[in-house]
Image (tube, rainbow, N blue to C red):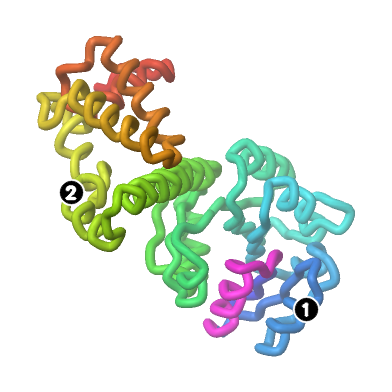
Amino acid sequence: MSKVAFIGLGVMGEPMARNLLKGGHTVRTFDVRPNVLEAVASEGAETANSPADSAKDADFIFTMLPSGKEVFQAAFGDEGFAQSMSEKTLLIDTSTILPADTDEIAEKLGNSKRRMIDAPVGRLARNAVEGTLLFMVGGSESDLEHARPLLDLLGDKIVHCGPVGMGSRMKIVNNYQSTSLNVLTAETLTLAEASGLDVNLAIEVMRETTAGKGHMNATYPDQVLSGNIKPGFMIDLAHKDLGLGLETTAKLHTPAFLGAAARQAYSIAQSKGQGRNDWTAIYLTLRKLAGLEPAK
């Protein structure tokens, strides 16, 4: 069994540390809040006085912290774990932070021949408790395999995204979609309710259409991502239908933050000659606006 330092016992970190304990590992924890340290200590965790103290003789260091600044401070501050981290120790940063922060931390550690993987998590707090998280991992194959027995205690899906930093990039992309869709879902259900519809019935209907199934499942794989932009549903029609929706939101005085932005995007696609193409062809318009090379 391994000696594990765990820094950051928040909503996600505390159950993760508990699951490592259940797996038989020695876990030495640090958090700025004494009460959470006491709670985990009652289940057998050791308590450290600082990040540096937690990392003494550790085989692995887990960090689950709110920001890149805090991860950097935990690593390189006055009592940072880099002081006591050996070349054999592997840092596993599960925090959601900017990719640039991950790159900086990895470079600084690498300058002293120390290793890390970035392994931010997907799913929710209950999955942390159940040990069914998804890990998006950036790092070498060998470091991932070294960490896998511990990650397997915490999650049921591990996706290797590439070298160090790619896990953070994948997490940013994933959360960009999920957090934006949360607002769009709220807009849609508010419109349904203001229209006099039963919200549960609206959900039942939308689960049977692209609205509920999602473009990642229902349209993109067979359309634009396969090089097929023959219209199953044209951008011109998407622009028209979304316009009808926005007229309705205006009459009912319901918020349409994302709906209005989406219609603007469809207008731009039309101006680029995409109007008669499949609605997924808007991806080609946005790629071009981003300066990306044409898809091969």
Query: Label 1 sits on what residue type?
Result: Asn
Q: Which residue is mark 1?
A: 35
For the question of whether residue 138 can be seen, the reply is: yes
Residue 149 appears at what percent x and percent y? 47, 70
Q: Quadrant of residue 203?
A: bottom left
Q: Tell me the residue at 45%/43% (across/down).
A: 180
| Residue 119 vertical placement versus 236 (above, below) | below
Q: Tell me the residue at 40%/16% (across/down).
A: 289
Q: Quadrant of the N terminus?
A: bottom right
- Residue extending furthest toward the right: 78
Q: Which residue is mark 2?
A: 209
Q: Residues within 10 Å of mark 2 (few under 14, many from 20)?
A: few
Which marked residue is nearer to the observer: mark 1 or mark 2?
Answer: 2
Q: Which is more N-terminal, label 2 or label 1?
A: 1
Residue 281 appears at what percent x and percent y? 23, 24
Between the residue at mark 1 and the residue at mark 2, the CA separation in whole angstroms equals: 47 Å
Query: Label 2 sits on what residue type?
Result: Thr
Q: Is residue 184 magenta?
A: no
Q: Residues within 10 Å of mark 1 (few under 14, many from 20)?
A: few
The foreground one among 256 and 144 is: 256
Point out which mark residue 136 bears: none
- Name the side, left or right, on which 199 lies relative to 56: left
- Name the side, left or right, on which 269 lies relative to 72: left
Q: Which residues are magenta?
A: 7-23
Q: Tell me the residue at 26%/30% (across/down).
A: 244
Secondary structure beneath dot 2 equals: loop
For the question of whether residue 162 can be seen, the reply is: no
